[in-house]
Amino acid sequence: MKDTQPSSAPVIEARDLNLTFETADGPIHALRDVNLTVGRGDFVSFIGPSGCGKTTFLRVIADLEQPSSGEIEVNGMTPDAARRARAYGYVFQAAGLYPWRTIAGNVKLPLEIMGYSRAEQEKRVAQVLELVELSGFEKKFPWQLSGGMQQRASIARALAFDAELLLMDEPFGALDEIVRDRLNEELLRLWARTQKTICFVTHSIPEAVYLSTRIVVMSPRPGRITDVIESPLPRERPLDIRDTPEFIEVAHRVREGLREGHGDD
Amino acid sequence: MRQSFFPVLTVVAVIVALWYAACVPMNGQWARDQAQRAGVELSFGELVADTLSQQRPRLPAPHQVAVELWNSTIVEEATGRRGLWNTGSLSNRSLIYHGWITLSATLLGFAIGTGLGIVLAIGIVHNRAMDQSVMPWAIASQTIPILAIAPMIIVVMNAIGITGLIPKAIISAYLSFFPVVVGMVKGLRAPDGMQLDLLKTYNATRAETFAKLRWPSSMPYLFASLKVGIAAAIVGAIVAELPTGAVAGLGARLLSGSYYGQTIQIWSALFAAAILAASLVALIGLAQRITLGRMGMDR
Amino acid sequence: MSSTSAPLPATPQVRAGRMQFWGMALCTLLAAALAPAAAGTAPPFTAISGLILAAVAAFMGSRRLPLAPALALAGAGLILAMASLVLAAAPPASAPFWLAMAATWLGLWMYVAWLADLNLRAPALARARSLATPAIFGATLLWLWEVGVSAGGVARVILPAPSVIAERFARSTDILWIDFVQTIVKGAFSGFAIGVGAALVFAVFVDRSPFLKRGLLPVGNFVAALPIIGTAPIMVMWFGFDWPSKAAVVVAMVFFPMLVNTVQGLAASGAMQRDLMRTWSASYWQSLWHLRLPAAMPFIFNGLKICSTLAMIGAIVAEFFGSPTRGMGFRISTEVGRLQLDMVWAEITVAAIAGSAFYGLWAVLEKRVTFWHPSQRGR
């Protein structure tokens, strides 16, 4: 399990990244001196209390926010160039499906925008819906499905085009724990099958430990990285791995890291 | 608010500039005809100067309207032979007089329409029979041009001896009535099931539920429909002044202006009406801000 | 109503119309008792018997009689009373006649309250009821108008009876059609199309500039509250007496409400949705077409509905300021002057039908286009 260290060219490389929002109450340091490298095939979780900049960091990777200083490269390009090259798929906390399009229509939307041929669109939609186990729901409208199914559809939408990188911002945060467990399992299977790199923001310790090869612990005011934990768990993970001593050990380290971050207040 | 001040100013400035620019082609023909008759050749500068200062232009320039507004309000009342200063009563040539005629009808009608509208809305919310039978008609009545009845009401009421303020107020009343009914029904129904259930657990009576929950929650809706209602009431009062042969009121000024081709008079009456409408809406907006602010409902 | 076979508790129905029921019974008894004393226009025997039938059926319905027959019998009795009172109405009406009229009105109101409080489980029945109750209420008003005007001897120049208006309507369909084409088709529709179309295009243009948007929205909201109808004399002066001036008034009336609604609609898509479009590096037009325009549809239709009513008002009222010798506004103002009020009411009927049909068209289209919106899904 040593190859969690980036071996080939890194997918994401951040050096001395800073981001400050100017507000009426003075500047807010959303990110301070963030250094991080994410290798190909990694599953990296970002965990921390709200306001620690985990979502902001993901948005910087996605070129949805501009850093104030420092450097960041995605696939060896600037985030802007990576976005134009459609290098990543983004999954938000809410499914964000268009109510006026069917499930198939929603998954097809990025393909339409990116100019895929009609036949290719049909093929890929069928393929990714199969992948997230939504075959047979193509003609349904989003508001006719449960929250978990909607979120699966939004993951399918992010997988539909050939992005090597998947950015997920608390994708299961609004779901109940039973559904979340199942989706976590499915996500791991998906990751194994597609070999994608995944950056995953969460505020749940078990979720982070269960999913990730690396866990990035962050803390607020100013938003910064306090610890990076390499997970010793194997890549193959059944749900009951969460009862093993190794798992509990990692979870303990994460909790310690979060507590330390809070000690600064 | 502060950040839209400059953009609004720009947009208004652009509109005024376009207005000035439009005056030249609109009034140019007449100016050239006059010049030709007099055998003079107009330079461009003279043409522009003439189009902005005609007696009866097709499109009066903004400053002409402003001057007319000034002259027919302050100047007329202060120095006119029949003005307030000399006679102690408003001059029938002044827009203050005509505006007051329209305003009084508007306010009376608006008060009647709003009051009845709120009463009906309370009835509809508390009575299923009224809800099912009256509400569809209240909604449907908003889709039909009821203003068309205005002339008939005026003439019929004249025929049975009711003249002056009351007929106009009635038209204003029924125009402001329906928006208030529909808005207030929505507002009184705004509390959700949880809030209503909470009062049920307190064993609150219908009257208490109304006073403590339904009425306060309907305030944003009330003010929204009051704004629609007052705008409709003004339109009602102005249109109601048309069929009686243009005696008094802003509508009468509009009509007499169009009889005699007094464009500047039409435009100044129109602006007086606009100022009146805008200040009434602003007044309701102010009341809204104060009320909702006290109730902690403004954001 | 025969399929209301489900056993229903009797109590709520009694309570629903109880006050009206006793009122009706009392008025009927008084009318029947006083009838012999009144000469000439006493309420006819059929009306009294219809009312008694309705009262008995309602009373039995609350006790033993199954609901469906009770409703049918009470309805039949009320219809009988209505019809015979219409036929017998002539001035000067006696006190018993007015009592019978009040009894019928209370009976109809009881009937509506009764229907409204029914606990209908089948959706088809509930839908039928939601059409029936306003229809009965509307019919009650028309009937009160008809009987009240003829029994009270109200002059035609004050308020013509509905039957007189209907007769006039049927007799003058040719004139009404000419007026309809002149005012609604030529004036309102063309102005509506131009004004709304221009506002839509302009809104997309404004939407590209935040500066313009911040400047225009308050101005647009301000203008939308002004009595624009007052520009009618100016438009008549510029565009002549015929329909172009009416269309111009309509354009001026609908432009800003439509602009404000569309601009707000184009801003209605969520920040997350717009971020998503950005992660796909969608172009401006792609995100407009795929996201912002569909998301704006509820607002656009709201604007279209508001403007459809404004267009009718604008086209009709603008004719009060000058028109050729046809058009609905022209007809209304001249026939009022000649005290031909039945013709005025016929024109108003046309206006009401045209207005609600035009509005209904947009409402139906809205339902089809914005089927996904929560406000449409609920129903």
Image (cartoon, coloured by chain):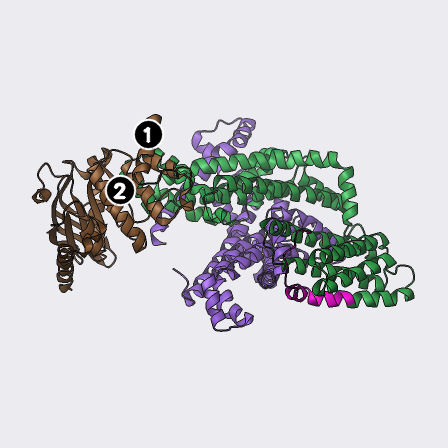
Crowdedness of circle 1 by 10 Å Cα count: few (<14), some, many (20+)? few
Residue C232 visible somewhere in the drawing: no
The chain in green: C
Chain shown in purple: B
- Residue underneath mark 2: A90
Cα gap from disc 1 to disc 2, whole angstroms: 21 Å
Whether residue A150 sits left or right of residue B266 in the image: it is: left
Which residue is tagged 1? A123
Q: Magenta residues?
A: C1-25
* Residue C9 sits inside the magenta stretch: yes
Chain of residue at mark 1:
A
Q: Determine if the magenta segment contains residue A127.
A: no
> Chain A's shade in the image?
brown
Give the structural element (helix, strand or loop) at label 2.
strand
Q: Is residue B227 or residue A94 the one in the foreground?
A: A94
User: Residue C75 placed where, x, y %?
Assistant: 74, 55
